[in-house]
Image (cartoon, grey):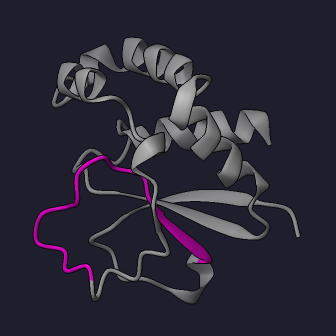
Amino acid sequence: MATSFKVKRIYAPASPEDGFRVLVDRLWPRGVKRETAMVDLWAKEVAPSDALRREFHGNPERWDRFVQAYRKELTRGPAASAARDLLEHKGPVTLLYAARDEAHNNAVALKAWLDDHA
């Protein structure tokens, strides 16, 4: 079975269709208990760098610049290795994020990158 990627807010209920659930945020989401989050992997390494996260946070007008910079990060160091591991996974993978903005967040950008490289 080929890998398919989807994104979902970590605050939404888990479902069997999620498959392998991967938290792709550098920080653990507020109000979410680790015991009940149903996270299979916390892939901090694939999350945007602290500097990039701080620059973009709450500024959707910087989205294009964020995506471009994040794509560069995904080709280097630990982020590249973590992204490669996600690409090698078989079956459905759900990228979990905590951001309120469902259209402009690192999981959406990561999914687009993974889809391009799958």
Residue 89: percent from left, percent from top: 74, 62
Q: Main secondary structure of the magenta part?
A: loop
- Residue 32 vs 100, above or below: the answer is below
User: At x 88% / y 70%, what residue is drawn?
Assistant: 1
Residue 70: percent from left, percent from top: 46, 23
- Residue 49 vs 84, above or below: the answer is above
User: At x 32% / y 80%, what residue is drawn?
Assistant: 37
Residue 36: percent from left, percent from top: 29, 88
User: At x 56% / y 76%, what residue is drawn?
Assistant: 18
Is residue 47 or residue 6 the one in the foreground?
A: 47
Q: Residue furthest left?
A: 31
Q: Which residues are magenta?
A: 19-34
Is residue 101 or residue 74 the one in the foreground?
A: 74
Was residue 52 drawn as part of the magenta stretch in this picture?
no
Residue 59: percent from left, percent from top: 19, 23
Was residue 25 drawn as part of the magenta stretch in this picture?
yes
| Image quadrant where residue 90 sits | bottom right
Label tally: 0
Q: Is residue 52 left or right of residue 82?
A: left
Q: Residue furthest front?
A: 77
Task: Locate the C terminus by quadrant.
Answer: top right
- Residue 70 vs 104, above or below: the answer is above
| Image quadrant where residue 2 sits | bottom right
User: At x 11% / y 72%, what residue is drawn?
Assistant: 31
Q: Is residue 76 left or right of residue 87?
A: left
Is residue 8 or residue 53 the one in the foreground?
A: 53
